[in-house]
Amino acid sequence: MIKKILVFVAVLLSAPSNAQLLWKITGNGLSKPSYLLGSMHYAPANFIDSIQGLKAVMAEVEQWYGEVVDSDTTVNNYIPNDSVLEMPGDSVLSDFYTTKEQNRINHFIYRLTVFDEEDFLWEKEDDTPGAALHDLVKEHINEDNAKFVFGSIPEISFDTNFELDAIKNNKPVGALDDSELHRSVLSDKLYLGRRKLKKQAKVLLYFIDNYAKINLRVYRTMVEYQSQDLLRINNTHGIKTRNKEYHKTKTASVQGRNITWAKKMPPIMADKSTLFVVGVAHLGHPKEKRGLLQLLQKAGYTLKPISQPSQN
């Protein structure tokens, strides 16, 4: 295992720092190469021009697969059910907090101007699961940092640009996630195991109490993505937190899906040359063992970064 980790690190370090987002997949019986791109969902569309070889790959491949399909032209699109945004039964979010904790959360989100009214949480949002509010605050952080790092908040996800390009060129598009997996994001069945509502509430409180550190980590990740340095990105993303529940949730949302995707990808690649576009954190940290790069290598595929030509 140590030898495998060293080989993986050697591959990363041997690639130029601006050539680690796009990977070529060959071997294991593939008749045509496929490709894996690590995406930053909040990057602007014109960032495509910055990734060496990406436009040529987009023209070469026969189909596109992302985490989800955002267009409404395919049955793979997932439209969330409103029921996953509500607490089950008679449960309310305030059941899981003391009065002081309620005030702390209320003040924090009001200060972030996510809502307009100071009493939003306990009078209007008390039937919303902690995971849903957690995602709302994360979205605010991502948009704030995207505006600062990239200059604007994109109207569509960076990933969706590839989907639309494929559709424009009459190429099939597909999703690695299914509707059930997405439904689990906002329910009490998050990825690995069944997280209870009480644990969701604890994660939300931890997230709010450690907002400054988490916000800085998001900022660093976006800056590192802009410089296309995969090793630094995954070092930043892989930092452990003191809260076991928060770390378990964050890890499971990446690694749990990676395991599922690594099983889905082989028949997709065998059928057609494919460009897979997933969040950059899914590519993997050398010590994780469950990054997509590591899982595909373990399955017998050869992965090679698309290299920037030398500057002479």
Image (cartoon, rainbow, N blue to C red):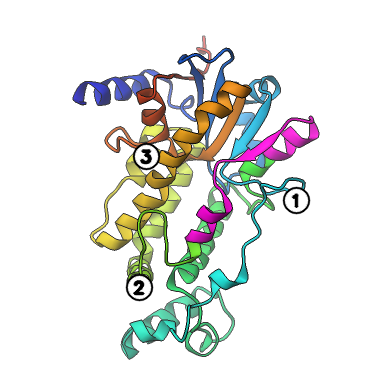
Of labels 2 and 3, earlier in sequence is 2
Magenta stretch encompasses residue 148 = no
Q: Classify 10 Å Cα crowding around label 1: few (below 14), some (14-19), many (20 and above).
A: few
Vertical side of 218 occupied by 133: above or below? below
> Which residue position holds label 2?
205
- Is residue 107 left or right of 125 when viewed as pictured? left
Q: Quarter holding the N terminus?
A: top left
Q: Position of residue 231 (x, y in %)?
A: 36, 33
- Identified at 39% across, 46% down, the residue is 256
Q: Is residue 86 visible?
A: yes
Numbered label tally: 3
Vertical side of 204 occupied by 303: above or below? above
- Identified at 53% across, 15% down, the residue is 30
- Range of residues picked out in magenta: 162-184
Q: Which mark is residue 234?
A: 3
Mark 1 vs 3: CB contact within 8 A:
no
> Between residues 252 and 270, which one lies in front from this camera angle?
270
Amino acid at the residue labelled 2? Leu
> Between residues 92 and 135, which one lies in front from this camera angle?
92
Q: Position of residue 282 (x, y in %)?
A: 44, 40
Of labels 1 and 3, earlier in sequence is 1
Which marked residue is nearer to the observer: mark 1 or mark 3?
A: 1
Q: Which mark is residue 72?
A: 1
- Identified at 53% across, 55% down, the residue is 180
